[in-house]
Amino acid sequence: MRPDTEVDFTLHKHPVLAVVCPVCHADAGVWCRRPSEHAAWDLHAARKRLADQVFIDRHGASASIELTPAGWVVDPCGRAAAAQGELFHGGAS
């Protein structure tokens, strides 16, 4: 994947679908395929690792992606807040 390629982790049904699979070469937005060309049960591990790396490169190690009723949302400080024990960044109520 070229670094200048636009990747939108909030666009697809699953955030990992934002990147092209390095194993089966499924395009962004397309589920992984088995060698038999049937849809795979799960996404390839290499694709998951690539998506993690691209996400961290673009949004930082403190960011997270969360599923909301409106869809996927990138939270720039989600992992940092979780590490501090805060729920939804509001602290204890």
Image (spheres, grey):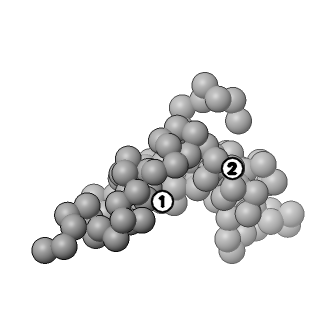
Q: Residue furthest top?
A: 4
Residue 8 visible in the current orientation: no
Residue at x 75%, y 57% (from the top left corner): 46
Q: Which residue is mark 2?
A: 50
Residue at x 43%, y 59% (from the top left corner): 79
- In this rendering, the count of numbered labels is 2
Nearer mark to the viewer, of 1 and 2: 2
Residue at x 52%, y 38% (from the top left corner): 58
In the shown orientation, is residue 50 left or right of residue 66?
right
Badge 1: how crowded within 10 Å, few (<14), some, or many (20+)? some
Return the mark for residue 56: none
What is the secondary structure assignment of the residue under circle 2?
Answer: helix
Residue at x 61%, y 53% (from the top left corner): 52
Q: Earlier in the sequence, mark 1 or mark 2?
A: 1
Q: Which residue is mark 1?
A: 13
**Could you tell me residue 78's position as x and y percent?**
38, 57
Residue 11 visible in the current orientation: yes
**Could you tell me residue 63's position as x and y percent?**
44, 50
Q: The residue under label 1 is which amino acid type?
A: Lys
What is the secondary structure assignment of the residue under circle 1?
Answer: loop
Q: The residue under label 2 is which amino acid type?
A: Leu
Q: Residue furthest left?
A: 93
Using the image as rendered, state which of residue 34 and residue 4 is in the foreground: 4
Q: Residue furthest front?
A: 84
The image quadrant where one finds the C terminus is bottom left
**Could you tell me residue 62's position as x and y percent?**
45, 51
